[in-house]
Amino acid sequence: MDCPSTVSWQTEKQKAIESLIENCCDTTSFRGLCFSRGGLLNVLDNLRKNVWPLLARDNKMFIDRISSEEIKHHQYYNQVVLDVKRILKRFPPGINENIQADLQVKVTELIIRVLIANEGLHYYQGFHDIAITLLLVLGEEKSYSVLCRLSQSHFQLFMGPDMEPTMEILNLVYALVKNENRDLYNYLMRSELGTIFCLPWAITWFGHVLNDYETVVRLFDVFMFSHPWTSMYLSAVVVLHRASDIFLTPCEMPLLHQMLSNVPDNLPFDSLITETEKLMRTYPPDVMEKVVREMHAEKYLKHKFLLIFPEWH
């Protein structure tokens, strides 16, 4: 049973969110509430159903229902179907098989509709993790509008013809770790771990690696109403938080990759979100952008040098 103080903060927060909704406030007004304790609260996602669609309030993009034949002939259809078949762990407990099968069809259609509406964007593995979360919270039409908006903003970087821009921006995780814990940064660099371990964290907003539905939607609250790089900042915070576990793991790439790839569901995400907000204030994205570009260029030059002179490795 919740104690009175617990009920009190949740009730007060719910009132604050409902007031913003009622007064049609812009999305920036919700940012502080999303970062603060509990996010948009997990009361059957009732508040999220009203707040998340505000992202697409000014988005006029709409396409008529697409025929099943058009969907099946889309260039990414087969890949999406394969990915969606592996999505079972993302469904909240208690959903029966028939509903699961129906949701798999709907999330496939949702993704293809968004891709058709945004012809310059490309599907990537992990986009289905984003789509299923939106579908579970918002239903078909609202999730379509929101996913279209996010594809044009937060996920546009990931939806190019190749992964080069994505791999470049993942250097942000190392840049932030370096600023906060030089010993940890040196340990990770010595292991030649790279950034693949945190790729699914960033591009699926942790949806692919966490099993707890309430934690996933809590993180979506934050990512949706903040800078597109916020998932990278949280990734850095998770690495910093697990520094002691990292130092206890032998400095070998396979072992560190395995350890970090498995993100515990019981991490204190509310406090980690608070640390993420602090990190973004200390090292703003516009300041870190130049650092990230320089790190990527340095890695590229080193890689090119070793291809020419492998004996110098």
Image (tube, helix red, strand yellow):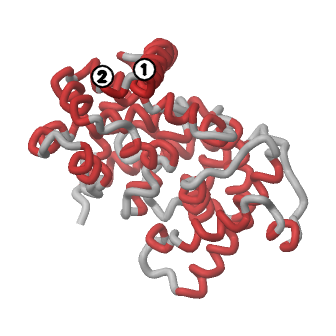
Query: What is the C-alpha distance between the residues marked 2 and 1?
Result: 9 Å
Graded by Cα atoms within 10 Å as few (under 14), some (14 to 19) or many (20 or more), the crowding at tag 2 reads few
Location of residue 71 with respect to 99 vertically, above or below: above
Q: Can you tell which quarter of the image residue 172 is in?
A: top left
Q: Amino acid at mark 2?
A: Trp
Residue at position x 37%, y 63% in the image: 211
Q: Residue at x 61, y 81 (%)?
A: 101
Q: Are marks 2 and 1 in contact (CB under 8 Å)?
A: yes
Residue 278 visible (yes or no): no
Q: Which residue is mark 1?
A: 305
Q: Which quadrant would the N terminus be assigned to in this image?
A: bottom left
Residue tagged 2 = 312
Position of 217 with respect to 115 (left or right) is left
Q: Is residue 197 left or right of residue 151?
A: left
In this view, 306 is above or below 217: above
Query: Does residue 276 appear left or right of residue 264 in this picture?
Result: right
